[in-house]
Image: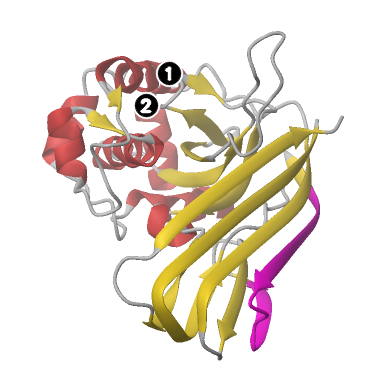
Amino acid sequence: MRYKIRHITAYNYQESVHNCYNIAILAPNSSERQTCHFNDIYLNPYPSTAVSHRDYFGNSLFQFDIQKPHKQLTITSESEVEVHEPVIQPSPNLTIKEVKDCLLHRKDTPSLLAREYLLNSTMIKKHARFKAYAETELNDDRPYHEALIALNHKIFTEFIYDPAFTSIATPLSEVLEHKRGVCQDFAHLAICCLRSCGLPARYISGYIETLPPPGQKKLRGVDATHAWISYYCPDSGWVDIDPTNDTLINHQYIVTAIGRDFADVTPLKGVIFGGGTMPDLKVSVDVARIK
């Protein structure tokens, strides 16, 4: 399946910004399951300098600065991505204990690299509360993939999708306590549960295609960025699963970046000088299937 993606981020500042320095992670990555055929990023105002490179996780970073006064900033990312099938499926036979043993004793490169995702990260700290929440599903004798599906379903059924409840600064402990949040929160929650139980998991940011009701035309700008998780299976590699929608990913999921948590894959971050208080921010995303 091939998609054209247009992601527009527009800032309107109360006062003039004298200069700014930014990092954007907006270009979809290429992997075994998808190919990014092109990505262009357009800036208004035009940047003083701009450079692209890969980060530690292999994500495409676009760094730019604007060294002239401006009250508006628009970043437009246009991409064309082909998503391949089939998605990797995990072995149904391994138990959770066998997975832990593999991670402890295997010396192959993928298993060694996966151990990094057992550690705490900027926004996710392992804790006994999350281990206790997950252990009802993640007991050692249970088949690994079956247990992950069950945990995914547990989060989906017990938590309420509520964009008004959390912000980027809301502690994960509050998400667990009140059982409310958005896709970013549910991804962080699932990762924290797995890591707290000794299982590696990583954060995936990207897009999901939304389809209009039958007989209706799709509206412009109704798509959005999305977040889900990836867990490591020694016999199969990384397997992506979405706790917000209670599903394994399919061809409608387009990966932008991979990291330990949201802090590693933030679509846009930086420093501005000036601008007044909180700027007006508008984001528009279109994911259009072209074949």
| Disc on res. 172 | none
Asked if one can make out residue 108 in the rendered structure from this viewpoint, the answer is: no
Q: Residue at x 65, y 87 (%)?
A: 49
Tag 2: amino acid: Ile
Q: Is residue 105 visible?
A: yes
The local crowd at label 1, few if under 14, some if 14 to 19, many if 20 or more residues have their Cα within 10 Å, is some
Outermost right residue: 291
Residue 261: where, in percent of width, then height? 39, 52
The question of residue 235 being in magenta is answered with no
Q: Residue at x 45, y 19 (%)?
A: 246
Range of residues picked out in magenta: 36-53
Q: Are marks 1 and 2 in contact (CB under 8 Å)?
A: no
In the shown orientation, is residue 143 left or right of residue 34? left
Q: Position of residue 269 (x, y in %)?
A: 45, 68
Left or right of residue 79: residue 283: left
Could you say which is closer to the camera, residue 98 or residue 201? 201
Q: Does the magenta-highlighted stretch encompass residue 52?
A: yes
Q: Nearer the viewer, residue 19 or 177?
A: 19
Main SS of residues in magenta: strand
Q: Secondary structure at mark 2?
A: helix
Q: Quadrant of the N terminus?
A: top right
Compared with 84, 93 (above or below) is above
Q: Position of residue 50 (x, y in %)?
A: 66, 81
Q: Residue at x 71, y 45 (%)?
A: 5
Task: Left or right? Give the position of 210 relative to 184.
Answer: right
Residue type at numbered disc 1:
Ile
Residue most extreme to the top = 214
Q: Determine which residue is flagged by label 1.
A: 149
Instruction: Give the residue pinned by disc 2.
Output: 96
Query: Which is more N-terminal, label 2 or label 1?
Result: 2
Q: What is the CA distance from the residue labelled 1 to the residue labelled 2?
A: 13 Å
Q: Is residue 46 above or below residue 137?
A: below
